[in-house]
Amino acid sequence: MSTSNTVPGLALYHYHACPFCAYTRQALDKLKLNVERRDIQKSAQHRGDLIAGGGSRQVPCLRIEREDGQVKWLYESQDIVKFLVHYSQQTDLIA
């Protein structure tokens, strides 16, 4: 995991034993993106936020808050990883 600050606007809802979550966490580590991780099995608050915001308890789910305050809930591990790769490439261009 990167020692840099947490990426603003992104949070991964997951739980430890989920293989699809593990795949997503591995992508985060490989891309060196320090995204806040919210374990829905350890926190009833995170579980409730996921259900209220995303409409489903399914994990992994990436909560994406845009600069204008709009929130998108992205499900499916492969879709999340594709988003993260694209995000990482855009961030590299800015840095």
Image: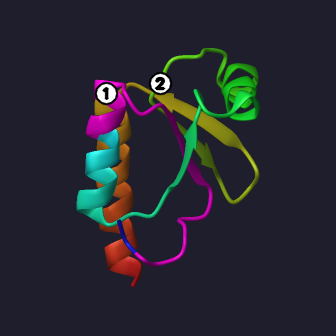
Numbered circles on residues, count? 2
The answer to whether the residues at label 2 and label 1 have Cβ atoms under 8 Å apart is yes
Horizontal arrangement in the rendering, residue 76 relative to residue 42 (left or right): left
Task: Name which residue lies at 39% across and 63% down.
Answer: 33
Q: Position of residue 69 (x, y in %)?
A: 76, 51
Residue 20: assigned label: 1
Q: Amino acid at mark 1?
A: Phe
Question: In the current view of this chain or complex, which residue is farthest to the bottom?
Answer: 95
Q: Is residue 37 above or below residue 17?
A: below
> Circle 2 — which element?
loop
> Circle 1 — which element?
helix
Quadrant of the drawing holding the C terminus: bottom left
Q: Is residue 66 above or below residue 91?
A: above
Q: Which residue is mark 2?
A: 59
Q: Is residue 52 above or below residue 93?
A: above
Q: Position of residue 2 (x, y in %)?
A: 37, 72
For the record, the magenta segment spans 3-23
Q: Amino acid at mark 2?
A: Val
Horizontal arrangement in the rendering, residue 60 relative to residue 85 (left or right): right
